[in-house]
Every structure is written in C-alpha cells, then in structure tokens.
Amino acid sequence: MKTIILHWRGPYTFEEVLSDKKAGNGLYLATGKRLYERVSKILYCGITERGFAQRLKTHHKINQITKDRKFWLARIAYPIDVNREILEMAEKIIVWTWQLPLNEKKKISKSNPTTILHFWFKRDGTPRKNQLKIYRDFSDVVSWDGNYWRTANLKIEEF
C-alpha cells in the first residue's frame, strides 16, 4: 500500500495562479459554480508536472466553471521522490472518493491500495485550524486497502 501526504494551500484566484511561475509536480482542485448552480463546490482535480500556471492557462475543463472560480494547490510532502505514477495515484483516489463532476474518466474505477493524508494550509503556509465549507465534507485521511475504505478527520492541537 502506498501512502501519500498532500499539503494543500489556497484558495487562489485564476489570475493569482497564472502569475505564479513556480514549478509543478503537484495537484490542484478547481472550485466554483457551473452555469445554473447555486452553491460553490469542488468540481475538478488534476495533476501537473509543469507549473500550475502552464497547466491551467490552457485547461479544457476550467472554462466550465463560470462563477466564483478558485483553486487549491497541493505539493506532495511524502513520498519525497514524486513521479507521474504518484501524482496519478493521488488524483485517482481523490476523484473516485469525491466523485468530482468534471472528472469523468477517473471516477469509474477504484485505485490501487492507497492512503492519502490531506493537510490544509492558508496561502501563507500556516495550518488551517478550522475546515472551510468548500472541503468540509471531505475526509483528511482516506485509505483504501483493496476491500475497505477508511476515513477520518484530523484535529490540530497545540501543546
């Protein structure tokens, strides 16, 4: 079983992502509303080995998000050696468990046994102590052993 730890930062506007020229090897969540939707939600998860700006400026799904478009960007904190296989494993388990509306392909079949830990941060890198509404229904820990799903939320405590 693989374990992947993701550090999510955000939310960012589309313009803020485009102005950031940092390298890739990460995941992104696109949130907002499509035409005729009333509530913002996570609509798409994707990966990039390039910079986030390079990937998103020509992305074919992003234009379907017409209102309140925001992005969460994730770096893989573990494992240290990130390759396309690790990125795709993380993306697949996120898409399958969350059944994201704009990800058609990867929500059909389950991933290989994988555990993902989601750590959420503000844009400045400080930990988010309270979950934001946009991702409140998603578990911080998602584990698939091939037979059973296990989920949990993490709590930040100061000692």
Image (tube, rainbow, N blue to C red):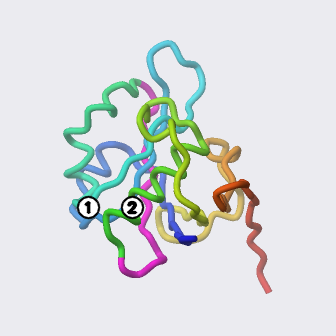
Report which residue position mark 2 lands on: 87
Closer to the eye: label 1 or 2: 2
Q: Tell me: residue 37, above or below residue 65.
A: above
Number of disc labels: 2
From the viewer's perspective, tell me whether residue 12 is left or right of residue 131.
Answer: left
Answer with the quarter of the image where residue 118 lies.
bottom right
Q: Assign the N terminus to one quadrant of the image.
A: bottom right
Q: What is the residue that sits farthest to the bottom in this orientation?
A: 159
Q: Position of residue 154 (x, y in %)?
A: 74, 66
Front residue (pair 58, 98): 98
Q: Where is residue 145, by image quadrant? A: bottom right
Kindly state the secondary structure of the residue where label 2 is placed. helix
Given the image, on which type of amino acid does mark 2 rest? Answer: Leu
Magenta span:
67-81
Q: Does the segment drawn in magenta span residue 68? A: yes
List x then y, in percent, for residue 14: 33, 42
In depth, the one of 100 and 115 nearer the eye is 115
Which percent across, then down, holds residue 126?
56, 71
Give the residue type at disc 1.
Glu
Magenta stretch contains residue 5: no
Query: What residue sits 47% from the left and 75% below the top?
Result: 77
Q: Is label 1 in a helix, a strand or a loop?
A: loop
The disc at residue 49 is 1
Residue sitting at 32 percent across and 69 percent down?
83
Q: Label 1 vs label 2: CA separation? A: 9 Å
Disc 1 to disc 2: CB gap under 8 Å: yes
User: Magenta span: helix, strand or loop, mainly?
Assistant: strand
The answer to which quarter of the image holds residue 52 is bottom left
